[in-house]
Image: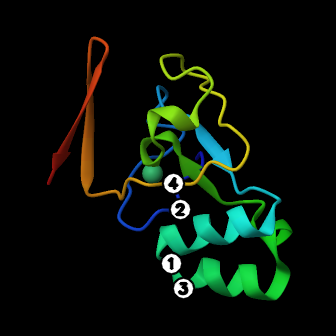
Amino acid sequence: MGRKCSVYDCVNNSSRHFSKSFYSFPRDSETCLAWVKFCGCKDLELVFFSQGPWGLDKYKVCSDHFAPESFRNTYQKDKGLLFGAKPVYPAHLWKETVGEYIIYHLT
Ligand SMILES: [Zn+2]
């Protein structure tokens, strides 16, 4: 089981990708709407517009979609997403960490 990332085309799943963090949708509706739009999934939009951020309780977005400056602890597993952070990297960008560098590949 485990939670799958809600971003379109993202295969990350909390039961298989232990090194990634999975975040709940923010309660702040402006930030939440930005996340929903980013996910590119009609189902999520329908839930958001009918129930608001609280309707999205069972959905998650994985840490792959956030910029390093969105986290309190970029290099730890529990990165700590900062308030108001919005996802920026779509699922088709493949990210690799080499030492202190993060390299983004277009696939
Ligand atoms: Zn993801």
Secondary structure of the residue carrying numbered label 2? loop
Q: In 3D space, how far apart are the residues under numbered discs 2 and 1 (Cα atoms)?
A: 8 Å
Q: How is the image coloured?
A: rainbow
On residue 87, which mark appears?
Answer: 4
Indicate the quadrant where residue 107 lies.
bottom left
Residue shown at 46% from the left, 76% from the top: 40
Secondary structure of the residue carrying numbered label 3? helix
Secondary structure of the residue carrying numbered label 4? loop
User: Does the beta carbon of the residue at mark 3 sit less than 8 Å from ligand 1?
Assistant: no
Structural crowding at the residue carrying mark 4, measured as other residues with C-alpha within 10 Å and reported as few (<14), some (14–19) or many (≥20): many
Residue named by callout 2 = 6
Residue at the top extreme of this rendering: 99
Where 76 falls versus 105 (above or below)? above
Q: In 3D space, how far apart are the residues under numbered discs 2 and 4 (Cα atoms)?
A: 12 Å
> What amino acid does circle 4 point to?
Pro
Marks 1/4 in contact by CB < 8 Å: the verdict is no
